[in-house]
Image (spheres, rainbow, N blue to C red):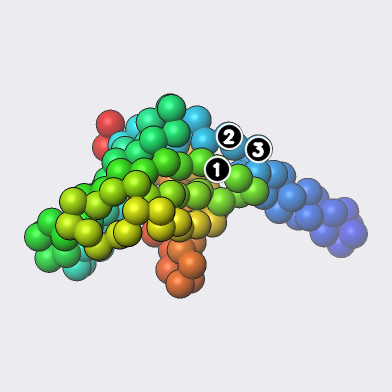
């Protein structure tokens, strides 16, 4: 009984990881928002691989950017093209591990280890 339970648990874990790996990014097309007590971040991912976004700190706009995005090996990859406030230099890249994606939200783990849930806004 213990072996079959362990085998089942292993299959569930492998299946959940595989579902993130199989994603080609189409589930992320749309507009998303992350909010915490001090900041908010908006991204709009387009089907052609481009994105726009902005960051507010204490409700003040501090970054407004454009770039290219893709999903590879379970990670959300960003390549920035421009930032109106020059906070992100052209050509800068970023990588967030995709932990969960569904139609209403996605969860990432950033390079600094923080987890953030983005909620679909459109």
Instruction: Specify few, some or many for label 2: CA neighbours under 10 Å numbering under 14, 14-19, or 20 or more.
Output: few
Q: Earlier in the sequence, mark 1 or mark 2?
A: 2
Q: Are marks 1 and 2 in contact (CB under 8 Å)?
A: yes
Q: Is residue 112 above or below residue 20?
A: below
Is label 3 or label 1 in front? 1
Residue toward you, 2 or 78: 78
Count how many numbered circles sit on residues in the image: 3
Residue count near mark 3 (Cα–Cα under 10 Å), binned few <14, some 14–19, many ≥20: few
76 or 12: nearer the eye? 76
CA gap, disc 1 to disc 2? 6 Å
Residue at the spot of label 2: 24
What percent of the width, then of the height, locates residue 102?
Answer: 48, 38
Image quarter where the C terminus lies is top left
Horizontal side, residue 74 vs residue 94: left or right: right
Residue at 52% over, 36% down: 25
Query: Sequence order check: which comes first, mark 3 or mark 1?
Result: 3
Where is mark 3, residue-wise?
22
Q: Are marks 3 and 1 in contact (CB under 8 Å)?
A: no
Cα separation, mark 2 vs mark 3, equals 6 Å
Asked whether disc 2 touches disc 3, contact meaning CB atoms under 8 Å apart, the reply is yes
Q: Which residue is mark 1?
A: 71
Estimate the spatial distance between the alpha carbons at disc 3 and disc 1, rounded to whole Å. Answer: 10 Å
Q: Nearer the viewer, residue 112 or 2?
A: 112
């Amino acid at each position: 009984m213990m072996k079959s339970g362990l085998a089942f648990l292993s299959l569930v874990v492998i299946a959940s990881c595989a579902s993130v790996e199989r994603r080609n990014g189409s589930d992320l097309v749309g507009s998303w928002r992350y909010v915490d007590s001090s900041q908010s971040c908006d991204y709009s991912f387009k089907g052609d691989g481009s994105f726009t976004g902005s960051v507010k700190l204490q409700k003040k706009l501090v970054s407004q950017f454009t770039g290219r995005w893709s999903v590879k090996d379970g990670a959300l990859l960003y390549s920035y093209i421009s930032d109106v406030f020059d906070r992100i230099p052209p050509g800068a890249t970023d990588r967030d591990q995709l932990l969960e994606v569904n139609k209403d939200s996605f969860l990432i783990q950033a390079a600094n280890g923080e987890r953030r849930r983005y909620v679909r806004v459109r």
